[in-house]
């Protein structure tokens, strides 16, 4: 995994891109709404969940054969009180169904931009949890993350994306409720 296209230009996009560039990857940023061709072997969807439909409509045909990384947390952004996908599914599963020729992974949704950029949280290495069904794609992403100085853990099959989204939802609601700083989060101690 040496070429990455990040669709999105916000804080998370730049934090993820910084980690991957630190590990030697070539990173292309594409703004949401641009119609710039996806160049990377891996495409990271670094947009809010409500923008996914538009991103897939714009870039869906370009994602075939690529690794696609979903970082979204599908929560109700008006109330911050629930996930907006069915309880037996996940945003990532829905994305995978719409781009069946891609190798879809869930990652980065349980970290904040500040902890990715700092590469630490609470004095421990920032840990990115990665879920997906394609072992080679997960191994490559985990390698790119760790090469960039951040810890990464294989969280299991794509079906684990639902639990990762629940953890991301909890972390976001704690931060919005000012019970956790945006520089905080969950760490994995080994």
Image (spheres, rainbow, N blue to C red):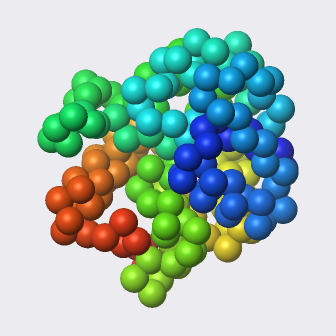
Give x and y (percent) for residue 89.
33, 28
Quadrant of the rendered image containing residue 105? top right
Give x and y (percent) for residue 58.
64, 15
148 or 132: which is nearer to us? 148
Quadrant of the rendered image containing residue 99? top right
Position of residue 28 relative to residue 15, above or below, is: above
7 or 74: which is nearer to us? 7
Give x and y (percent) for residue 126.
51, 72
Residue located farthest toward the bottom when viewing the structure as drawn: 123
Instruction: Name which residue lies at 71% across and 68% down.
Output: 148
99 or 36: which is nearer to us? 36
Instruction: Name which residue lies at 45% across and 87% down.
Output: 123
Horizontally, is 183 left or right of 142 in the view? left
Give x and y (percent) for residue 114.
49, 67
Instruction: Name which residue lies at 44% across and 36% down.
Output: 48
Position of residue 182 relative to residue 154, above or below, is: below
- From where the camera sits, is residue 190 visible? no
Instruction: Name which residue lies at 57% across and 18% down.
Output: 56
């Amino acid at each position: 995994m040496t070429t990455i296209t990040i669709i999105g230009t916000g804080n998370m996009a730049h934090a993820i891109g910084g980690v991957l560039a630190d590990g030697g990857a070539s990173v292309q940023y594409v703004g949401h709404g641009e119609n710039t061709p996806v160049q990377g072997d891996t495409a990271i969807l670094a947009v809010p969940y409500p923008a996914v439909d538009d991103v897939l409509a714009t870039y869906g045909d370009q994602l075939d054969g690529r690794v696609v990384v979903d970082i979204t947390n599908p929560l109700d952004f008006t109330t911050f009180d629930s996930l907006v996908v069915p309880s037996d599914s996940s945003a990532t599963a829905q994305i995978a169904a719409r781009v069946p020729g891609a190798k879809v992974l869930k990652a980065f949704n349980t970290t904040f931009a500040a902890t990715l950029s700092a590469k630490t949280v609470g004095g421990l290495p920032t840990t990115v949890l990665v879920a997906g069904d394609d072992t080679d794609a997960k191994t490559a992403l985990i390698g790119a993350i760790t090469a960039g100085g951040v810890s990464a853990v294989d969280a299991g099959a794509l079906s684990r994306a639902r639990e990762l989204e629940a953890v991301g939802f909890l972390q976001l609601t704690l931060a919005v409720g000012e019970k956790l700083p945006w520089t905080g989060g969950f760490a994995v101690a080994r």
